[in-house]
Amino acid sequence: MTDRRIDAKWWKSSTIYQIYPSSFMDSNGDGIGDLPGILSKLDYIKSLGVDAVWISPFYKSPNKDQGYDISDYQMPDPAYGSMADVEAIIKGCHDRDMKIIFDLVINHTSDQHKWFQESRKSKDNPYRKYYIWKPARYIDGERRPPTNWEATFGGSAWEWDETTEEYYLHAFVVEQPDLNWEDAEVRQAIYKEAILFWLEKGIDGFRVDVSSHYSKHEYVDAPIIKPEQYIQPARAKYVDGPRLREYLEEMQRETFSKYDSVTLAEMSGTRTLENKLDFVGESSKRFSMAISFDLATVDHYGREATYLWWKPYDLQEFKKITEAEQFLSGPNTDGWALTYLENHDQARSISRFMNDSPEYRTISGKTLAMYLLTLSGTPIIYQGEEIGMINMPKSWPEAEYIDAASWMFIQTVRDDIQKGVKGIAEEEAFESLQRIARDHARVPMQWSNDHSAGFSSSAKTWMRVNPSYKAGINVAEEEKDECSVLNFYRRMLAFRKEHSDSLIFGEYQNLEAETEKTMQFSKKSFDGETLFVALNFSGEQQKASLPDSKGELLISSSTHPDQEDILQPYEGRIYRV
Ligand code: NOJ
Ligand code: CA
């Protein structure tokens, strides 16, 4: 048994707040969030009680994938502001005793990046080797991509380039060519441009985008699942390739470790516990923590097949995933868990896992806060989650779903139907968008009752504002209400610090509950304090199955908790036992 508090790095006892720059706060009335907007809200973020801020990409970008297609690693996009603004944010966070984490997108660049602009010019251009170029293949005299691989959001993963008459690889959208990590010089250029530059400026770490993608498998066809067409689902071909571990160790050694910086690695490929420990165990020297996808896809049909296909989630599976993830922070490993319910790639958690109706939204949001903030490891709160924001209205038309992943998903479904591929019906596809599209998280943050939810002085915002701000889901209203989701987050964050021995560093134990509709677990500290957490995920009353004798109720997400250990619909409770 290890006491996990010993020598714990700062990020182990931290909570991280994630900002999506285009939708956080617009300072100049152009309808797009920006860096001065972020700066103006640092006091608000600090007031929540979080310890670190992660900002999604704000670098120069043509926004084909909302900033995850970077055309200049060392410049903020002019729509967001200047380098002076970036520096002010770094300083602003540090002045408030918060750490600052940037996004690192180095599996691919934008096709507008100078490296790619050069690379596509000629086969003997010095930058040719920066990307993955392959000749066409001819089948019955017809030109085809070099392999049958499908890109993550649909369509071929290869794009034909007229100038040099070859294909380049892109795991995401066409405008996001994959970098060629196999070349040592390319890796060095990435480290220098994208990583060391910012570490030198004093940031505290990175969230590392699709970090299991850098090493590709052999360029051979993926198995045929859709015999009606050439392109086949192929995610496994560009995730977790044979040289991944080698690259990650090199990157750690040559960049992050020199600055002792934290890394939150987005690892969609890691599934088993051994696999995760391989990447985040202290002894593995790869990353600090992994953003894993198990919980994020609990309400998706197999990611391998179709990106956004929704299915109802199963609470038993939800619990199993949580337990497995918690093991990472337990006494028998050298890993560390990272927990989240939301980010810019996920729909709103109240709408997904609880009940977003006016009657139950508040208690649902508070109970999810209790889930997130009683687990061991490092939690991430996504902007708006702390005020209980919900999905876009069901009445909104397809045109409001502007994310590439959304429209490419719908397009793939329509193509499949036309070709007679067995799969999703069109209505089912639209329902999937209504449930789990990434757009839900990307609409503007709701600050007040003012027009455009106080996000912008303009009535025209880059994404439509969710009208729910008028129903009290906004910061200003929730500030005034002692029982709001917002104030509950503050309370829970303070509570988490007070009980850090059990909540952050303690041992998680899933407890058999009398009912399948609840999740009940205990958190035990190294020195013996045990807290018991009971969360009701259903719309009916349930029993809190306290272990042993009666416990002392410390917090409830209900304003009128029952005295007899009966949980109200969607209520969560913490007891000392
Ligand atoms: C993961 C990012 O979170 C997502 O928004 C993006 O589309 C892909 N990586 C590609 O960079
Ligand atoms: Ca702006």
Image (cartoon, rainbow, N blue to C red):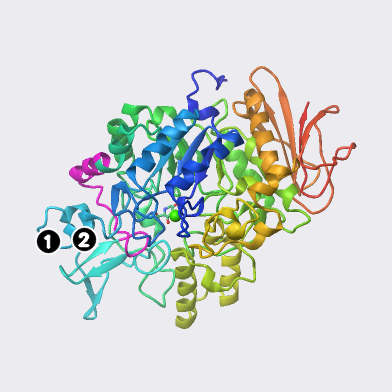
Magenta-colored span: 170-192
Residue drawn at the location 41% of the way across and 35% of the way down: 90
Amino acid type of the residue that numbered disc 2 sits on in the rendered structure: Trp
Is residue 539 shown left or right of residue 46?
right
User: Residue 374: horizontal and vertical position, in percent?
Assistant: 66, 34
Is residue 561 among what the camera can see? Answer: yes
- Frontmost residue, 525 versus 10: 10
Is residue 279 among what the camera can see? Answer: no
Q: Is residue 82 above or below residue 125?
A: above
User: Residue 523: horizontal and vertical position, in percent?
Assistant: 68, 29
Q: Are marks 1 and 2 in contact (CB under 8 Å)?
A: yes
Amino acid type of the residue that numbered disc 1 sits on in the rendered structure: Lys
User: Residue 558: horizontal and vertical position, in percent?
Assistant: 80, 43
Is residue 519 shown left or right of residue 431?
right
Q: Which mark is residue 123?
A: 1
Q: Is residue 177 magenta?
A: yes
Q: CA distance from mark 1 to mark 2?
A: 9 Å
- Frontmost residue, 346 versus 6: 346
Which image quarter has ligand 1? bottom left
Residue drawn at the location 64% of the way across and 62% of the way down: 467
